[in-house]
Image: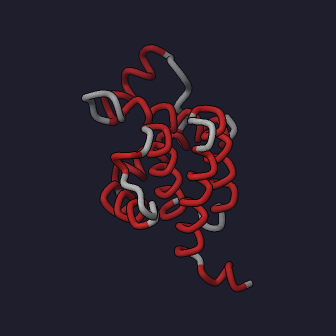
Amino acid sequence: MKRRNSRENAFLAQFELSFEQTNLDELLETVRENDEYGLDAFAEQLLRLYEAHAGEVNTLMEEHLKGWSSERLSKTSISLLRLSIAEMLYGEPDMDSVIVNEAVELAKKYAGEKDYQFVNGVLGTVSRQLHPAKEEA
């Protein structure tokens, strides 16, 4: 499975978790049993990265919302931001531009009309904070 598809499927699972009163392991088991959508090893890794570092990811996200709070955001945007920030922090290095681009495309597909701009802005500022040397180059 291509990473783009893995990211989308991980997003769908994370979005589902935002509604369900279940944990990640239970969701993964249900998804596999029902073959709802494919969660390959990379998709599961993204979900586990967020789960393992939720506190840090949520704090970093909140710091960059600029006048917003997570309570005001759609579950779609929150799910995209959480997975993307977790991948930026703990995934492969130097993938931020790909991560941002794919999150924006998913926001265009699943979120409100202008949510993609918000997602792009937040993730761009997070990336610049995490990698200030790239900004100078």
Point out the residue furthest to the front here.
67
State the image quarter where residue 47 is shown: top left
Which sits in the foreground, 15 or 3? 15
State the image quarter where residue 6 is shown: top right
Does residue 24 appear left or right of residue 42 in this picture? left
Where residue 43 sits: x, y (%)? Answer: 53, 40
Quarter placement of the C terminus? bottom right
Point out the residue furthest to the top here.
34
Where residue 40 sits: x, y (%)? Answer: 55, 34
Quarter placement of the N terminus? top right
Total number of numbered discs in the rendering: 0
State the image quarter where residue 66 is shown: bottom left
Image coloring type: secondary structure
Where residue 32 sits: x, y (%)? Answer: 45, 22
Which sits in the foreground, 67 or 88? 67
Does residue 85 appear left or right of residue 2 in this picture? left
- Against 44, residue 90 (above or below) is below
Residue drawn at x 43%, y 22% as measured from the top left: 31
Which sits in the foreground, 28 or 135? 135
Residue drawn at x 49%, y 44% as measured from the top left: 77
Residue drawn at x 68%, y 42% as measured from the top left: 105
